[in-house]
Amino acid sequence: MAQLERLILMAEDELTQYSTDARKIEKLRQKIGISVPLAEQRQIKETLLAEMPTDTLSQLVEKQRQTVALPFWGIAGLGLLLGISFSQPFDFAIVAAAGFAAFKIQQWGWKLQAKRLVIQTLEDIEERIQQATAK
């Protein structure tokens, strides 16, 4: 679903901005409202809700990706320090593995946050439509 991937990329762009979640949702709501039909918005929301993992680790990574990745960055730094100090090539393999793990954890958390932002935005759009029709 190309539209879903596009919305996730738009959400990732909003995550790079230093602003509140409400402001991010507001900016994303305007973009989604213009470019995605209402029926397709509902379909995308259902797809995202089905895709989102519900286990504890995924929720922790979504909310605290940097905290979860921090030990791996520490292991990479320590491996680099020991590898240089003792001239041990095995330590450089640890640096590569731990750095890769930390990067992948942060990337996973970033994607989860972007998906959650799209879900929140689509829910906000639905809520505003319901409020407008109730008046």
Image (tube, rainbow, N blue to C red):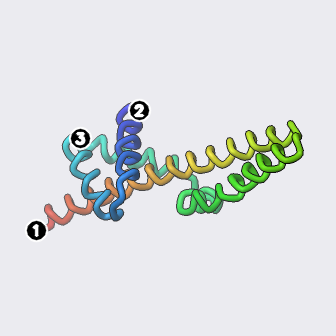
Please report whichever mark, 1 or 2, sits nearer to the chain's N-terminal start: 2
> In the image, what residue type sits under mark 1?
Lys
Q: Quadrant of residue 133?
A: bottom left
Q: Quadrant of the N terminus?
A: top left
Tag 2 residue: 1
Where is residue 81? Give x, y as percent.
Answer: 78, 50
Q: As drawn, which residue projects farthest toward the top? A: 2
Taking 105 as reference, is 22 left or right? left
Asked if marks 3 and 1 touch (Cβ < 8 Å), the reply is no
Q: Are marks 1 and 2 in contact (CB under 8 Å)?
A: no
Tell me whether circle 2 and circle 3 mark residues in contact (CB < 8 Å). no
The residue singled out by tag 3 in the image is: 37
Tell me the quarter of the picture where residue 71 sits.
bottom right
Mark 3–mark 1 distance (CA, rounded to whole Å): 22 Å
Q: Nearer the viewer, residue 60 or 119?
A: 60
Question: Secondary structure beneath disc 1?
Answer: loop
At label 3, counting other C-alpha atoms closer than 10 Å, the crowd grade (few under 14, some 14-19, many 20 or more) is few
Check disc 2 and give the amino acid type.
Answer: Met
Going 66% across and 49% down the picture, which residue do you hit? 102
Position of residue 4 relative to residue 77, above or below, is above
Query: What crowding class fits label 1: few (fewer than 14 Cα within 10 Å), some (14-19), or many (20 or more)?
Result: few
User: Which residue does the numbered mark 1 point to in the structure image?
Assistant: 135
- Residue lying at 62% horizontally and 49% vertically, measured from the top left: 105
Which element type, helix, strand or loop, lies under badge 2?
Answer: loop
> In front: mark 1 or mark 2?
2
Mark in the foreground, 3 or 1: 3
What distance separates the C-alpha of mark 1 from that of mark 2? Answer: 35 Å
Q: Marks 2 and 3, Cα distance to the nearest angstrom?
A: 14 Å
Residue 90 falls in image quadrant: top right
